[in-house]
Image (cartoon, rainbow, N blue to C red):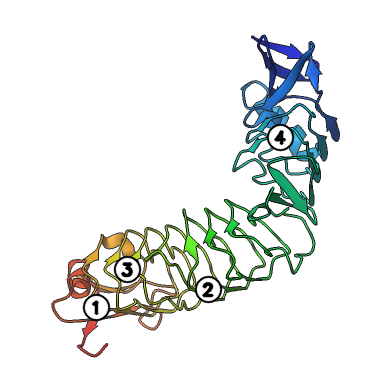
Amino acid sequence: MRKYYQNYRIDESDQEVVILYYFGDEESVIVPNEIHGKPVTAIADEAFLSAGNPFLRDVSRKICQKSLKHIKLPSTLKHLNNALIYCLELETIRIPASLETISNRCFTQCRKLRQIDVDDKNRFYSSRDGVLYSRDGKRLIQFPMRKKTVPSDVLDGVTVIGNQAFSNCEALTEIVIPESVQSIEYSAFCNCSMLETVQMHPNIVLNGSGHFSNCVRLSDIMFFNSEPVVPYGCFSNCKALRKINFGSTIKTIAEHAFWGSGLQEIAIPDKTKKILSGAFCQCLDLKKVIIPKTVSYISNSAVFSGCGIAETDEGPVYYGRGHDRDAACTFYVHPDSAGEKYCIENNYIYTTGTDL
């Protein structure tokens, strides 16, 4: 049964209580362990945005963004869903021993979060230097966005860098992925505005998409993925990325992989077979593209939209930054290849050769 209790909207059953949303204005909140003699076992998605109540949504977002700084979770809590999304002022949180699950996007846009502590008796989670890990330390779950320093041992013993684990981290300027790390998941480093250098190893697996998207200062990376693909949106909007060194196994460049990046030239790897929609769309600084004969499929005109020189009835149209011949991209392709076909279909000016 849904009802109100103090500053909370709750869902109360015979056995437990779920917090649906909160509409107070305190800087520090202590969520009760029990309500009406029943344990509080879960906090719902966007509970601290009052998303379940359309009449309170705008008001509560303003409140949470400007006031909520510290929260103490109930010692009875088992499930923390995406309850803290957009709590922009939240600074600290302590995970109780009872907690069993934390949803992937729980801390999204908690831009002032600097410390996550976990009760030593928790069976599922642990913390080290204010960073949230799985209990065994093999999965890095959340690096607080406002944490001022990155410990040198932050990845020691880690095998998985989780979804959005470092997203929006302002302290991260470089990262060396040790060989112990086996996989990097969805948007793990997205929006790291100060990140400039990444060192990866050849056996890494990139799961999901958007791993380094919007890392606007990223300029130096040797890219590896033991799966033969550059994932969806992996380097989208990486404005400082002038070149990319691929591993030798890449067979597919996925949708929007380099959308809006600062690439100036690109040599598609020899083993690549597919380039999908928007992969290099709006790369306005791109001046040279080499497409090997191994590429058999280029999905549509959007792959290089905004690049190149197109022939029209009114004369050539120069794409790229500046919209002139010097700024436009030149394509180098093999005769009778998918690359040449793509250029012909889209009226791009290109150069052919057999020793590209």
In the picture, which quadrant includes the N terminus?
top right
Q: Which residue is mark 4?
A: 99
Q: CA distance from mark 4 to mark 1?
A: 60 Å
Q: Which residue is mark 2?
A: 201
Q: Which residue is located at x 61 percent, y 58 percent?
A: 191
Q: Amino acid at mark 2?
A: His
Where is residue 153 drawn, in percent x and y?
73, 67
Q: Which residue is mark 3?
A: 251
Q: Residue at x 59, y 60 (%)?
A: 159
Task: Establish if 138 lies above or below 338.
Answer: above
Which residue in the protein does label 1 denote? 349
3D distance between C-alphas at marks 2 and 3? 18 Å
The answer to whether residue 306 is visible is yes
Cα gap from disc 4 to disc 3, whole angstroms: 42 Å
Disc 1 from disc 3: Cα separation: 25 Å
Q: Residues within 10 Å of mark 1 (few under 14, many from 20)?
A: some
**Amino acid at pointer 3:** Lys
Q: Residue furthest bottom?
A: 355
